[in-house]
Image (cartoon, rainbow, N blue to C red):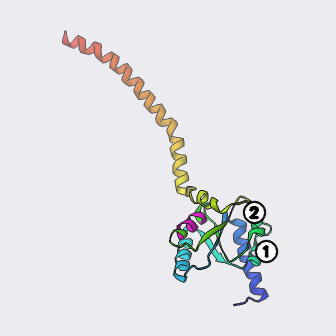
């Protein structure tokens, strides 16, 4: 179905708004993907904070103009599915990687993070980034470690000093 000019402008404005606030972009070739697979991907995208859209490449290149994803303009060829991570950088990579496991037709083609165009193989690296909760958990562990180490040292010193005093007291009790 062909879009008229105002519909095209609406699509460009919508994608430009998303691109302006997104953390990362993964564009994947989706030709041969079934409707049920696309529906499952869209459902998972909504749950994980990923904006998933099939857009003509000319409209997508206009939408990303002026954003950090402008570097992908020259690589937009063929039928592409665009996944923008809105909540955490690795969400789009995880979505595409997971969907590609059950669909050999879905292949990541473009990965862009922080204004850099990366090879498609970097979808693995992007997918391996921790979620926000995992990152906060790791930070809490790192921040708590010095205090726990200090507590272990104090306990070791106390045990050592307490063990030295207990021996004379035991010897006096035996005598």
Q: Secondary structure at mark 2?
A: helix
Q: CA distance from mark 1 to mark 2?
A: 13 Å
Residue 69 x/y as whole percent: 74, 65
Front residue of this view, candidates 40 and 158: 40
Q: Is residue 158 above or below residue 82?
A: above
Q: Is residue 4 left or right of residue 91?
A: right
Farthest-out residue, left: 175
Q: Residues within 10 Å of mark 2 (few under 14, many from 20)?
A: many
Please, what is the dominant secondary structure of the magenta stretch?
helix
Indicate which disc residue 62 carries.
1
Residue at coordinates 37% horizontally, 24% vertically from top-left? Answer: 159
**Residue 38, placed above or below residue 137:** below
Q: Residues within 10 Å of mark 1 (few under 14, many from 20)?
A: some
In this rendering, would 75 be left or right of 139? Answer: right
Q: Looking at this view, is 7 or 108 the one in front? A: 108
Q: On the image, which quarter does residue 48 sit in?
A: bottom right
Residue occupying image coordinates x 24% and y 15% = 170
Span colored in magenta: 92-99
Along the line of sight, which residue is nearer the eye, 50 or 124? Answer: 124
Q: Which residue is mark 2?
A: 68
Residue 173 coordinates in the image, percent (x, y)? 21, 13
Residues under numbered marks 1 and 2 in contact, where contact means CB atoms less than 8 Å apart: no
- Element at label 1: helix
Earlier residue among tags 1 and 2 = 1
Residue 142 appears left or right of 4: left
Which residue is farthest top?
A: 175
């Amino acid at each position: 179905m062909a879009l008229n000019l105002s519909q095209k402008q609406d699509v460009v404005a919508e994608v430009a708004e998303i691109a302006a606030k997104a953390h990362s972009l993964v564009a994947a070739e989706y030709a041969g993907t079934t409707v049920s697979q696309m529906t499952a991907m869209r459902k998972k995208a909504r749950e994980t904070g990923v904006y998933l859209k099939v857009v003509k490449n000319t409209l997508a290149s206009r939408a990303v103009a002026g954003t950090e994803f402008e570097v992908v303009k020259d690589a937009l060829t063929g039928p592409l599915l665009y996944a923008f991570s809105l909540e955490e950088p690795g969400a789009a990579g995880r979505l595409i990687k997971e969907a590609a496991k059950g669909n050999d037709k879905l292949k990541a083609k473009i990965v862009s993070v922080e204004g850099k165009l990366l090879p498609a193989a970097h979808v693995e690296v992007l997918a391996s980034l921790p979620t926000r909760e995992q990152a906060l958990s790791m930070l809490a562990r790192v921040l708590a470690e010095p205090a726990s180490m200090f507590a272990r040292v104090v306990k070791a010193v106390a045990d050592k000093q307490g063990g030295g005093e207990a021996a004379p007291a035991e010897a006096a009790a035996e005598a």
